[in-house]
Amino acid sequence: MSLSDSDRTPQDPDLPELALRRPEALLRGALYVVATPIGHLGEMSPRAVDVLSRVDVILAEDTRHSAKLLRHFGIHTPLQALHAFNEAGKVDAVLARLQAGETLALVSDAGTPLLSDPGFPVVRAAREAGITVRTVAGPSALIAALAIAGLPVDRFAFEGFLPAKAAARRAHLQALAQEARSLVFYESPHRLLDTLADLAAVFGAEREGFVARELTKSYEDVKLASLSELLRWVEDDPAQPRGEYVLGVHGAPVQDKDEAFARKLFTRLSQELPPGRAAKVVAELTGVPRNVVYAWATDEKP
């Protein structure tokens, strides 16, 4: 028989710690980095609403955008702008408020702050000043896309937004052409076609990738296909959504000689380390997927 919520006690190990205390005791003079919805408003966690309702000030990427979100949830906390064009000049003022004992929250327009969004200078400076920085975890377009797109996610590299100029973008992609990990990018609608064309040209038209759009919204759409197919798919769609896209590209295939070296290295390391640890080290050094390396442990047994 399972316990109902009313039957559970504070000592119940099946309940997360934070679920046992409502409301949370906010730390004075702390900075809370708060994730907000990437699409569906139901992604706004009760903890995020509670924290944003009780901090002294919310630092927001776009105060107009965040004001709409706050109104929806009945939050009346004052907003101050902190965006890519002013954050460097705001660091000292933000630190002064925190050091004076105010509790602040940091939000971006959508998702988890700092991931291709403003906030890094403030978070870094706060930590260096000995100020407590807490996370209110929640939505992230990066993680949401990877979870459902179908590319390997045991190892991946997030590259954020690619350079806007074509030559710089292609040069950046060339430097990633032999990367064995899955690659993930953000892109804006007006550069989507150009970026997909460059991905196909640099990585090869048949390299697998994905396009994710409208995540968690009514028209959520994720397509996994070759890069050339993805380019055609976008070209044939006359009504592209306005929001940002998440793009993914499968890592470069492991060459036979690389796998031969990796197997030799695994054989040697497994004489000194447990198979799981040896597989992790080999995967990190060679780019061969860890599950592939670990499968060799069975082959090595007599």
Image: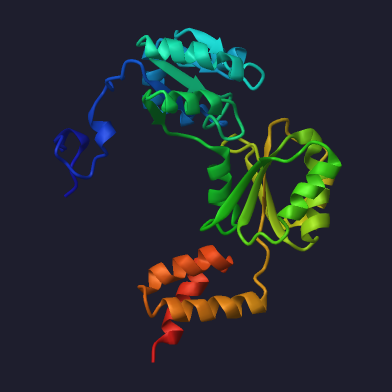
Q: Is residue 28 visible?
A: yes
Total label count? 0
Residue 31 sits in quarter: top left
Is 10 on the left or on the right of 34, as rendered?
left
Is 184 on the left or on the right of 153, as rendered?
right
At 60% from the left and 50% from the top, the residue drawn is 157
- Residue 74: image location, x then y, percent: 44, 12
- Residue 20: image location, x then y, percent: 23, 31
Q: Which colour assignment does the render follow?
A: rainbow
Q: Is residue 144 positioned above or below 19 on the image?
A: below
Q: Is residue 187 positioned above or below 96 on the image?
A: below
Residue 229 sits in quarter: bottom right
Q: Which one is nearer the viewer's eye here, 218 or 22? A: 22
At 22% from the left and 45% from the top, the residue drawn is 14
Q: Is residue 74 visible?
A: no
At 48% from the left and 14% from the top, the residue drawn is 94
Residue at the front extreme, as displayed: 129
At 77% from the left and 63% from the top, the residue drawn is 206
Residue 133 sits in quarter: top left
The quadrant of the image that shows the C terminus is: bottom left
- Residue 111: image location, x then y, percent: 54, 31
- Residue 232: image location, x then y, percent: 83, 51
Q: Which one is nearer the viewer's eye here, 151 or 289? A: 289
Q: Is residue 192 positioned above or below 130 on the image?
A: below
